[in-house]
Image: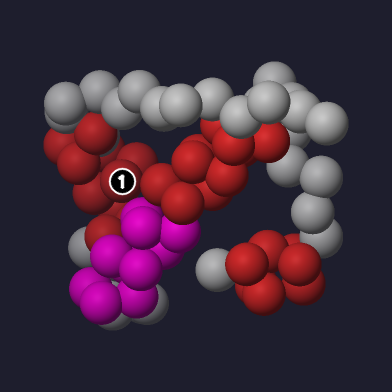
Amino acid sequence: MFVGMQWVKLAVYFYNDEKIKLIRNNKLIGKSKGDSIALIFIMMLALAGDQNREGYLPFSSYELSILF
């Protein structure tokens, strides 16, 4: 069994990163969906830390949809 990490470190300028800005403000998907995608990204970081498998998430997209 893998022992999970206690924390995941994010840079304080995370939301000012241009990739996150593009996701959050994408006119094709809408602001609310962009915010949801950014939140899912953070949730996946936390899950990767919990699994502690060097960033690898051993889940299918279906399993991730159930978890989130």
> How did the renderer colour the structure?
secondary structure
Q: Position of residue 7 (x, y in %)?
A: 41, 27
Q: Is residue 8 above or below residue 16?
A: above
In this rendering, position of residue 37 left or right of residue 55: left
Residue drawn at 54 percent across, 25 percent down: 5
Residue drawn at 24 percent across, 49 percent down: 21
Q: Residues within 10 Å of mark 1 (few under 14, many from 20)?
A: some
Q: Nearer the viewer, residue 64 or 23?
A: 64
Q: Determine which quarter of the picture holds residue 28.
A: bottom left
Asked if the stretch drawn in magenta spans residue 66, the answer is no
Q: Quadrant of the N terminus?
A: top right
The secondary structure making up most of the magenta span is: helix
In this rendering, position of residue 62 left or right of residue 29: right
Residue drawn at 46 percent across, 26 percent down: 6
Residue drawn at 30 percent across, 52 percent down: 22
Q: Quadrant of the C terminus?
A: bottom right
Q: Is residue 54 above or below residue 57?
A: above
Q: Position of residue 52 (x, y in %)?
A: 67, 26
Q: Total number of numbered labels?
A: 1
Segment colored magenta? 31-40
In this rendering, position of residue 65 left or right of residue 39: right
Q: Nearer the viewer, residue 39 or 29?
A: 39
Q: Which residue is mark 1?
A: 20
In this rendering, position of residue 11 left or right of residue 3: left
The amino acid beneath tag 1 is Ile
Q: Is residue 39 visible?
A: yes
Q: Position of residue 14 (x, y in %)?
A: 24, 34
